[in-house]
Image: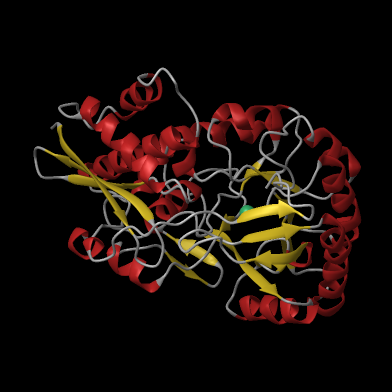
Amino acid sequence: MVIQEIRTIVTCPGRNYVLVKVVTDEGLYGVGEGTLNGSELAVAAAIEQASGLLIGRDPAQIEDIWQLMYHWTYWRGGPVFAAAIGAIDIALWDIKAKQAGMPLYQLFGGKVREGVLCYEHADGGDPVEVEDSVRSYLEKGFKVVRAQMGPYGGPGMVRHEPPMREGIPGTSFFDPAPYLTSTPKLFGHLRSKLGDLVELCHDVHEQLTPTEAAWLAKALEPFRLFFLEDPLRPEYKESFRRVREASTTKLAMGELFTSRWDCLPLFQNQWIDYIRFAPMHVGGITEARKICAMAEPFEVKTAHHGAGDLGPIAQAASVHLDMTIPNFGVLEWVDFPSAAYEVMPGACVCRDGYAHPHERPGIGVDIDEALAKKFPYQRAFMPIVRKTDGSMHVY
Ligand code: MG
């Protein structure tokens, strides 16, 4: 069996997704995903370019193909290449599991747990609204809930300007002071109303300086967070020492990490408790399994990224992996736009706060290519955030 064709599908059933179908000469195919918000076309181009190197190769040689794709560019690394490798790698694992006639998780040693614990996103304009939102997820069975005032920075986003022209995002202006002072008050309110045992986390969205992040982690310490998510920019790894030493608030980091080398210093120094990369964004399942194993002896658990930055195939890759690794922690869970479930039928389901993979051979998700064509790519960018003086924020 050899790889005959690699089809890249960029589709927007509610939001943009980068999908691949790796087709073999025997008709068997695998599906993968390399969605990278705001850079979808760059990933699609990287997959197209790599395809020329992969046609005619044995799809069973997943490790060798991973090494080839990582090293052939010479200018290796970075989110675009990592997502392109990730898309093809997931598709190759799908082929292998279909060949074996087993659900993908069986190839990683089988289940070690009954389901994958998930956390959902609660938000609102004030603490009472956030409390109501948290309660709505608890009623749905979620055991862990992320609590935010506003989706990005909440009270810290002090004003918004409309886009300079149609088709590009508007600009938000961030002031850390109202964000820093309101966030501990939010968790004080939630603890007083919901009690001490509800598991709550909070996402900083990489918006703080090391000193600000250390201040916030310390201020939140009395409220026993499940974790504080992405407190610093991904470039500031050494600064985790400062945040770590400021408090015992558990720290999660890494939804923007794209390689094992991003993760390693945080593991070796035990500066974090949870690692957040999505398997798709570090080069797929092959590399994700290795990074998870690297994390294990340092008592770092996983909290794979699962927000709107990825779709049902990338999510299924996380769920299959999370069923099998001893140091799984929690999975970020967000429902997709309804049309995405039709374009990618077979998405994993979440029941009572736990995700479950399907038992079909392979990853369990498919791509309806004809339907995908009805949802063409829509130009989209990530939000623009500036400081209150108008200069760019390091978001
Ligand atoms: Mg996040």
Quadrant showing the N terminus: top left
Q: Which colour scheme is used?
A: secondary structure
Q: In which quarter of the image is residue 39?
A: top left
* As drawn, 259 above or below 394: above
What residue is shown at x 78% (from left), y 62% (from top)? 156
Q: Position of residue 137 (x, y in %)?
A: 62, 76
Q: In this view, does 196 lie to the left or right of 298?
A: right
In the image, 353 versus 21, the foreground residue is 21
Q: Nearest the camera: 52 or 220?
A: 52
The image quadrant in which ligand 1 is located: bottom right
Residue drawn at (88%, 55%), measured in percent from left and top?
221
Image location of residue 60, percent across then percent down: 24, 31
Residue at the left extreme of this rendering: 26
Relative height, residue 62 to residue 311 (above, below): above
- Res 145 seen here: no
Relative to 79, say whether 323 is above or below. Answer: below
> 354 or 369, which is in the foreground?
369
Q: Where residue 261 sits: x, y (%)?
A: 59, 26
Image quadrant in which you'd find residue 30: top left
Number of callouts? 0
- Left/right of residue 53 with respect to residue 274 in the rendered view: left
Q: Nearer the viewer, residue 363 or 88?
A: 88
Q: In this view, does 236 lie to the left or right of 338?
A: right
Q: From where the camera sits, is residue 305 visible? A: yes
Q: Where is residue 107 shown, x and y percent of the image?
A: 36, 41
Q: Residue at x 22, y 65 (%)?
A: 371
